[in-house]
């Protein structure tokens, strides 16, 4: 049985969506732990309520990013992770951390990459007057939001949208595609070729919601 460790910084709603989907569909997977860089993260409470080990490693208690990431690696490896899932983990990871989990570290980003990498994606999408926005699940590499794309979902930008309304629509899309991407990984269906991800057997990796 494969093992997932999830990193969060807040309420971890995508983590919730993955756990609930796994329970509903009876995935053969073990959620070995959730780690947050903030002991106050609400997602830790959800984990504990579902019998999932929850840990806080406060980044402020470490003198450097490298020191913090070394502590993360020690805990993740002790939990035996086959897959590390970033679910609203608001820390820039060091190259050493990323290389350690190469090919088994995934993230979700609230935009249709390569558009709007980084922060404040909904505000920037509205400023750019795009008609379509969305979310992307991708493998993590050393570039910011540049890793090979696993899947994407698009949502319309509606008249009168502000960052909150658009963000809520994107978050609902995230909750649909992140569990799907995780299941594809667990089923061994993802192949990284260059900076592309091929799904075997092929099916659509883009969803219009």
Image (cartoon, helix red, strand yellow):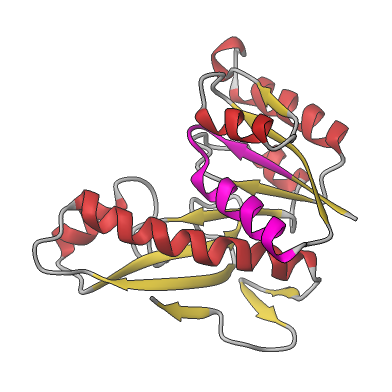
Query: Does residue 15 belong to the magenta stretch?
Result: yes
Which of the pair 139/1 is nearer the observer?
Answer: 1
Who's the residue at 43% across and 64% down the image?
173
Q: Residue at x 71, y 70 (%)?
A: 184
Judge from the rendering whether residue 155 lies leftward or rightward of residue 98; answer left or right.
Answer: left
The answer to whether residue 199 is seen in the rendering is yes
Picture coordinates of residue 141, whole percent (x, y): 62, 54
Q: Quick check: can you spot residue 140?
A: no
Q: Is residue 162 magenta?
A: no
Q: Which of 74 and 195 lies nearest the eye of the viewer?
A: 74
The answer to whether residue 77 is left or right of residue 10 is right
Where the C terminus falls, by quadrant? bottom left
Residue 3: horizontal and vertical position, in percent?
A: 82, 49
Our reading of the magenta stretch's main secondary structure is helix
Name the quadrant of the N terminus: bottom right
Q: Nearer the viewer, residue 120 or 159?
A: 159
To which quarter of the image does residue 29 belong?
A: bottom right
Give the number of marks.
0
Q: Which region is colored magenta?
A: 5-25
Residue extending farthest to the left is 160
- Counting from the top left corner in percent of width and height, residue 127 is at 14, 58
**Picture layout, residue 51 above or below residue 155:** above
């Amino acid at each position: 049985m494969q093992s997932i460790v999830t990193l969060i910084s807040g309420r971890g709603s995508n983590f919730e969506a993955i756990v609930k989907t796994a329970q509903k569909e009876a995935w053969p997977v073990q959620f070995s732990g959730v780690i947050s860089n903030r002991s106050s993260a609400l997602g830790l409470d959800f984990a504990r309520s579902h019998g999932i080990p929850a840990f806080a490693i406060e980044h402020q208690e470490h003198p450097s990013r490298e020191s913090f990431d070394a502590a993360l690696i020690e805990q993740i490896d002790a939990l035996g992770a086959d897959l590390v899932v970033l679910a609203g983990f608001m820390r820039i990871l060091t190259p050493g951390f990323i290389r350690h989990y190469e090919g088994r570290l995934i993230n979700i980003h609230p935009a249709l990459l390569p558009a709007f990498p980084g922060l404040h994606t909904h505000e920037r999408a509205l400023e750019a007057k795009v008609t379509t926005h969305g979310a992307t699940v991708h493998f993590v590499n050393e570039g910011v939001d540049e890793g090979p794309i696993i899947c994407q979902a698009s949502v319309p930008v509606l008249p009168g949208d502000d960052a909150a309304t658009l963000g809520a629509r994107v978050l609902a899309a995230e909750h649909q595609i992140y569990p799907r991407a995780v299941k594809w990984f667990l089923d061994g269906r993802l192949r990284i070729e260059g900076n592309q991800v091929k799904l075997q057997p092929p099916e659509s990796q883009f969803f219009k919601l």
